[in-house]
Amino acid sequence: MSSQYLVAVVGAGPAGLFGARELANMGARVVLFNRDLKPGGLAEYGIYPNKHTMKEGLRRQFRGVLDNPNIDYYGNVTVGAQGDLSLDELRALGFDAVLVTAGAQGTKWLGLPGEDLEGVYHAKDVVYSYNKLPPFSQKQFRFGRRCAIVGAGNVMVDIAHFLIHEQKVDEVIAVVRRGPAEVKFDKKEMEHVIANLDLSALDEELVRSTPVMQAVGQDPAAARVSILEALPKADPKTSETKFRFEFLASPVQMLGRDGVLTQLEVEDNTLVLKDGETKARGTGVKRRIDVETVIFAIGDKVDDSFGLPVEWNEFIKSKEPRFPVDGISYESTIEGIFVGGWSRQASTGLVGYARKDGTNAARAVWQYLQAKSPSAASAEAVSARLLALSKPVITKDDIKRLEAAEAAEAQKRGLEEFKFASNEEMLAAIGMIETA
């Protein structure tokens, strides 16, 4: 019998990394499994590329986590029904507990006609692509002159930022289900795009929305002030792209010719008060907007094929947890399996939130472990099983070599940061495969 608990953590984003650190610091031996080669998850592949200081600060913290001798790291290993290891195979390796922090890897669509047209995308694919996450980094996108983004949060603003500053398209239209008083983005994020905001179009939208807003007690003038709060600190303009909002509109369908998107049909909404909450309700009035690209920034869902039961885009949590933390259930409905971060609640909060949730999930796991004796499982047996896979498996030492290779490449090219855009390039850079 081992005297040390052996815990599997699936997913090495902020929730997984900080959860692993918490468990390792309490004395568990932790094996981190990661689908990507590099650790970091959305902190590596979801933050806008030019936020170098923020990203480097996070990477430094992640390096510190992986330096813990109680943590093993295996990248390029997928867990799930179609993965290198199914959840059952992972459990059969004898772990005392499994913490799932694999994020929300599923794609949330609304099930509308025309979602399969060329030019219709999900925000996650676009964000992953410009952040150079394989295989999304190799995908071809059709960003036309007029692009609609469905959503009103920070992801919508990030994609508008990319379309305005990098693609320099003619027009970006944010299609928002509710009204001007209910946008979800932060003022700080808005600073990157507000120089391109079409102010006269915004005022026209506010005039159009005013009767609906006033009927539910909202103040159009206050909404305008709130939306424009970022103006004094606006980033300088780098393109002539017009950025505007289309409020109180829900997408109904995408229309196209020869498999290629040409229009987005929306239904006009009104607002109603229900149980003290403002809800959008369709009016039946529909209209069409000429666009060549539609990007859905409507949140994410967990991966249905992972191996845990799913309901409402989330893994099902135990309604009566034995080991709640701060009144929250981190327990799946399967004995010994816990969920944290976006695997527990998709699309909620940023890095700080994921970090706290991963840490709390680890505390729930530790409480669970206290009621049992460590099994006879060994980290060496797990290592042997993984190294027998017919593919390159990335360890902590490989990550250090990869970081050094990318730093050298950045220096050579005179760039602040350089990333290899494919797994093949990364593996070749650290000598794990031959280049063609």
Image (spheres, rainbow, N blue to C red):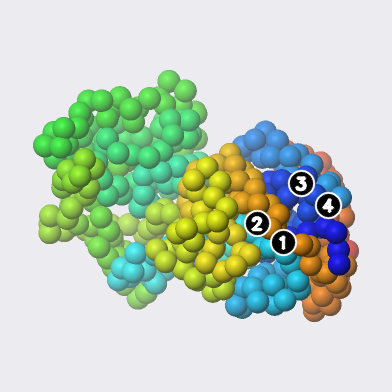
Is disc 1 in contact with disc 2, using a CB cutoff of under 8 Å?
A: yes
Q: Quadrant of the N terminus?
A: bottom right
- Which residue lies under the disc numbered 4? 70
Residue 223 visible, this orientation: yes
The part of the image, by quadrant, that contains residue 36 is bottom right
Where 419 falls versus 391 (above or below)? Answer: above
Where does residue 371 sit, x and y in percent of width and height? 69, 58
Q: Amino acid at mark 2?
A: Tyr
Q: CA separation, marks 1 and 4?
A: 20 Å
- Which residue lies under the disc numbered 2? 368
Residue visible at 79% across and 67% down? Answer: 375
Residue 342 visible, this orientation: no
> Which dot marks residue 372?
1
Q: CA separation, marks 2 and 3?
A: 13 Å
Identify which residue, 434 or 211, lies in the foreground: 211
- The nearer-to-camera label among 2 and 4 is 2
Where does residue 4 sit, x and y in percent of width and height? 83, 58
Q: Amino acid at mark 1?
A: Lys
The part of the image, by quadrant, that contains residue 187 is top left
Where does residue 154 sit, x and y in percent of width and height? 45, 42
Q: CA separation, marks 1 and 2?
A: 8 Å
Q: Amino acid at mark 4?
A: Asn
Q: Quadrant of the C terminus?
A: bottom right
- The nearer-to-camera label among 3 and 1 is 1
In the displayed structure image, the side of residue 288 where residue 149 appears, left or right = right
Q: Is the residue marked by circle 3 packed among few (<14), some (14-19), or many (20+) residues within 10 Å? A: few
- Mark 2 and mark 4 lie on one chain; the one further toward the N terminus is 4
Which residue sits furthest top?
Answer: 232
- Mark 1 and mark 4 lie on one chain; the one further toward the N terminus is 4
